[in-house]
Image (tube, rainbow, N blue to C red):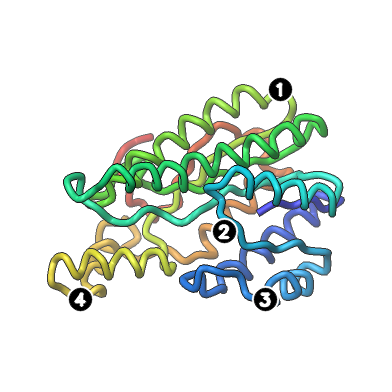
Amino acid sequence: MLIHPTADRLRLLSLRAMADAYLAQPHDQGTLGLDFDARLALLVDAEVLARALDVASYDAVRGFVAAAVERFGGVDICVANAGGPPARLFEETTPADWRAAADLNLMSTVWFAKETLPLMRQRRWGRFIAITSVTVKQPVEGLILSNAVRAGVSGLVKTLSNEYGRYNVLVNNVCPGYTATARLISLSRAMAEKEGVEPKQIEERWAEQTALGRLGRPEEFADLVVFLASGRASYITGASIAVDGGLVKGIY
């Protein structure tokens, strides 16, 4: 998600409206609706460029960012997000699984950073927000690919925050826990099939692991992303912040 409005208030309103609309999409179809850009434009009262692309492809990411810059003149905010790798135990993984997971979750973030951070540096203002998972703080059983690869994104984010902080470009990492999304439903189904139970039992087990005793709502996650993208989060960079309802038991 790339945003380049003209004022900070517009950044907030645009990002929140886009997040709400995006979360309402049936992502399991694998494509954006044909009228997605039109619906976003109506919500934010602004021009929108929406495009389905393979974020694991550097050429695709470079083309998308270039199109956004040509249309809007620059990029102020980049939220780098992608789907997660499949649930696997280590012995179930293949070399192709590891390559695909690295391309999807680590390299896609690298590609967006490579294309957007120099633009933000030139403007001396920017927000780069990577979306990973609570697995970077507390590994989740059965998600070896996510546990391993997403941790690399945290290291990338911390390093980039040091390199770009002097240019007023802030780089952070948001780590959602068990959140009621299509991705979570897919994971619960896969794990339930292996264990011979109902998906609801898996989801209830996850909820019991949190301090709040429930799954997260997508809008609760989106609210933090919007805050980090705003001017009010002007002294937060290099952070990996969990939105997990108290799932992580460690201090940090």
Task: Name the residue type under label 2.
Answer: Ala
Residue drawn at point x = 64 percent, y = 53 percent = 226
Residue 205 position in % (x across, y down): 22, 64
Q: Which residue is mark 4?
A: 198
Task: Name the residue type under label 4.
Answer: Glu
Q: Earlier in the sequence, mark 2 or mark 4?
A: 4
Describe residue 39's horizontal placement relative to residue 172 as left or right.
right
Total numbered badges shown on the rendered structure: 4
Q: Which residue is mark 1?
A: 166
Determine the secondary structure under disc 1.
helix
Q: Earlier in the sequence, mark 4 or mark 1?
A: 1
Residue drawn at point x = 76 percent, y = 53 percent = 11
Q: Quadrant of residue 179?
A: bottom left
Q: Which residue is mark 2?
A: 222
Please give the label number shown on residue 34.
3
Determine the secondary structure under disc 4.
loop
Who is closer to the viewer here, 132 or 241?
Answer: 132
How many angstroms separate mark 2 from mark 4 (CA)?
29 Å
Residue 237 position in % (x across, y down): 60, 33
Residue 191 position in % (x across, y down): 22, 64
Task: Name the residue type under label 3.
Answer: Leu
User: How many residues crowd around disc 4 within 10 Å: few (fewer than 14), some, or many (20 or more)?
Assistant: few
Q: Earlier in the sequence, mark 1 or mark 3?
A: 3
User: How many residues crowd around disc 1 within 10 Å: few (fewer than 14), some, or many (20 or more)?
Assistant: few
How many angstroms separate mark 4 from mark 3 (CA)?
35 Å
Describe residue 136's horizontal placement relative to residue 36 as left or right.
left
Q: Nearer the viewer, mark 1 or mark 3?
A: 3
Q: Earlier in the sequence, mark 2 or mark 1?
A: 1
